Each structure stands twice: as structure tokens, then as C-alpha cells.
Image (tube, grey):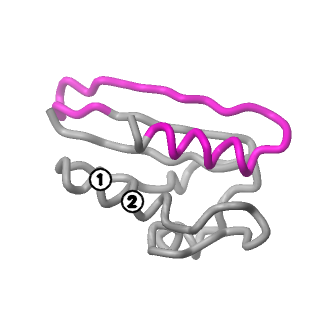
Amino acid sequence: MRVVDNLLQNAAKFTAAGRITLSCRNDEVRRTLQISVSDTGIGIEPEKREWVFERFTKVDPFKPGSGIGLYLCRLIVTRLGGDIRVCPEYRGGCCIRIELPY
């Protein structure tokens, strides 16, 4: 819940207008739960898609926050045996996808 909440808060912070979408899908073949949060906000530049998961990094230094939210999300997800990443194929904002095994 903490990870999803953080992703939704980030999406709201960087989406002045448009929409935020939370989706969940069960992949029975790979035995994973896939959760994604997408928005129509400012997006993340391709060269910063991994950088945003480092500690104390901020896409926009003028927005509130400490820069550890996505770092903590990755820490939690990887400790659960999963993966979290920015979707490179998504256009028109940002999409972050979590994949958790079950």
C-alpha cells in the first residue's frame, strides 16, 4: 500500500491537468501481479529513468518532497522479490510499473 500510495502522490504532484490511472493485472503464466500508475503529467526524460530511483533525486527541485520516495518504493518492491521501473514505451506523461511474484 505504501508503494502504491507514493506513486499516486507523485503522479498527482506532477500532473496539473489530465488524468492519473491505477491499473492492476494478474499474469497467471508468469505468476506475477502487475501494478501500474500512469499520468499525463510532465514525464521523465529517458536518461533519467533509472536516476529517479536513487536517493535524494528530484525531477523538479521546486516541487515539495525529499527525493527519497521512489528510492523507498524500489527498496520495498525489490525486498518483496519484485521489480519497479519507468515504462519506456509510455508517451504523454509517466508510467511506473511494478511486478511482484506470487
How many angstroms separate mark 2 from mark 1 (CA)?
Answer: 6 Å
Q: Which mark is drawn over residue 76?
A: 1
Tell me: 99 left or right of 21. left
Task: Please tell me in which quadrant of the rendered image residue 101 appears.
Answer: top left
Q: Which residue, given by chain and number where applicable, does mark 2 sit on?
A: 72
9 magenta-colored: yes
Residue 29 placement (x, y as % from top left): 17, 28
Where 10 sits versus 51, above or below? Answer: above
Task: Please tell me in which quadrant of the rendered image residue 20 appears.
Answer: top right
Task: Please tell me in which quadrant of the rendered image residue 26 appears.
Answer: top left
Mark 2 crowd level (few <14, some 14–19, many ≥20, 10 Å Cα): some
Residue 93 placement (x, y as % from top left): 70, 49
Where 67 sits versus 11, above or below? Answer: below
Instruction: Please report the residue visible at 37 percent of the width from the left and 25 percent of the height from the top.
Output: 25
23 magenta-colored: yes
Judged from the image, the secondary structure of the residue bearing numbered disc 1 is helix
Which is more toward the observer, 64 or 28?
64
The quarter of the image holding the C terminus is top left
Instruction: Please report the residue visible at 30 percent of the width from the left and 60 percent of the height from the top.
Output: 75
CB atoms of marks 2 and 1 within 8 Å:
yes
Judged from the image, the secondary structure of the residue bearing numbered disc 2 is helix
- Looking at the image, the residue that sits furthest to the right is 17
Residue 62 placement (x, y as % from top left): 79, 69
Query: Which amino acid type is shown beneath numbered disc 1?
Result: Ile
Query: Which amino acid type is shown beneath numbered disc 2?
Result: Leu
Range of magenta residues: 4-33
